[in-house]
Amino acid sequence: MNFNNAVFEASYGLFSQLPETAQLEIAISGRSNVGKSSLINKLLNRKSLARVSSMPGKTATINFYRLSNNVRLVDLPGYGYAKVAKGEKQRWNELIGGYFEQGRNLVLVLQLIDMRHEPSKEDLNMIETLVENELPFIVVLTKSDKLNSTERKERLSGLAHEIPYAEQITMLPFSSVTGEGVQELRGIIEDVTSE
Ligand code: GTP
Ligand code: MG
């Protein structure tokens, strides 16, 4: 699969607008500011295909990127940003919830968690939802460049207790600054889309 030829396809702000699809989808989920859009850019070897911002809440729509004829990457709006108005929060929840319950052709969810911190309650809820709906997922530990080796070891052993079923879940340290984890992630995506 050539990761350099991806194109932006479309954005949707409302659940009712989401198109049906026959294509395989890989969704990127995580709290606001965790690095979802940055991961997409790094994976696709592009500077700013997905909009990145230090202001949480940048991506407020579901954005589809075409990776190949039959594979799409789906950038979800981040959850857990306290400063968003209530009505807006509800729209996001409906959008994300609707997406996961729509019976799409999801071959993999990348659940992003900031490697520096314990998973939030919302991260744990999200993992619970993925497990309950039997959706295939891995945990991507973002911003790995911000930890020194001691902190890194501490977080890896912490996460083994903090995340339910941790021993059964693939956890991949990732950095959109150093490129750590990029090749592994491309390999995982090729595996799940190769049949
Ligand atoms: P929303 O669209 O608000 O949900 O955020 P997002 O998850 O798409 O995060 P985004 O990619 O916009 O990144 C948020 C901030 O974190 C930006 O300032 C990025 O430059 C920074 N960032 C993202 N990934 C990394 C990383 O791997 N390392 C470091 N050091 N900073 C990162
Ligand atoms: Mg974003």
Image (cartoon, grey):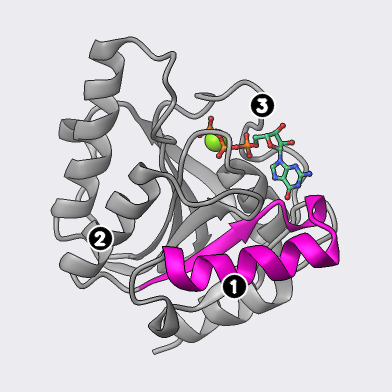
Q: Residues within 10 Å of mark 3 (few under 14, many from 20)?
A: few
Q: Is residue 92 magenta?
A: no
Disc nearer the start of the sequence (2/1)? 2
- Residue 61 falls in which quadrant of the image? top left
Q: Does 125 appear above or below 95? A: below
Q: Give percent across and percent down for residue 3.
A: 66, 66
Tell us which disc is closer to us: 2 or 1: 1
Tell me: 23 left or right of 171.
left
Disc nearer the start of the sequence (3/2)? 3
Tell me: 137 left or right of 40.
left
| Residue type, numbered disc 3 | Ser
| Image quadrant occupied by the C terminus | bottom left
**Which residue is at the front of the view, 25 or 113?**
113
Give the residue at mark 3. 53
Disc nearer the start of the sequence (3/1)? 3
Identify which residue is drawn at 34% across, 43% down: 122
- Residue 165 falls in which quadrant of the image? bottom left
Q: Which residues are magenta?
A: 137-162
Q: Main secondary structure of the magenta part?
A: helix
Tell me the SS state at disc 3: loop
Give the residue at mark 1. 157
Q: Is mark 3 within 8 Å of ligand 1?
A: yes
Give the residue at mark 2. 128
Q: Does 142 appear above or below 30? A: below
Q: Residues within 10 Å of mark 1 (few under 14, many from 20)?
A: few
Q: Residues within 10 Å of mark 2 (few under 14, many from 20)?
A: some
Q: Dots 3 and 2: beta carbons under 8 Å?
A: no
The quarter of the image that holds ligand 1 is top right
Tell us which disc is closer to us: 3 or 2: 2
Tell me: 108 left or right of 40.
left
| Residue type, numbered disc 2 | Glu
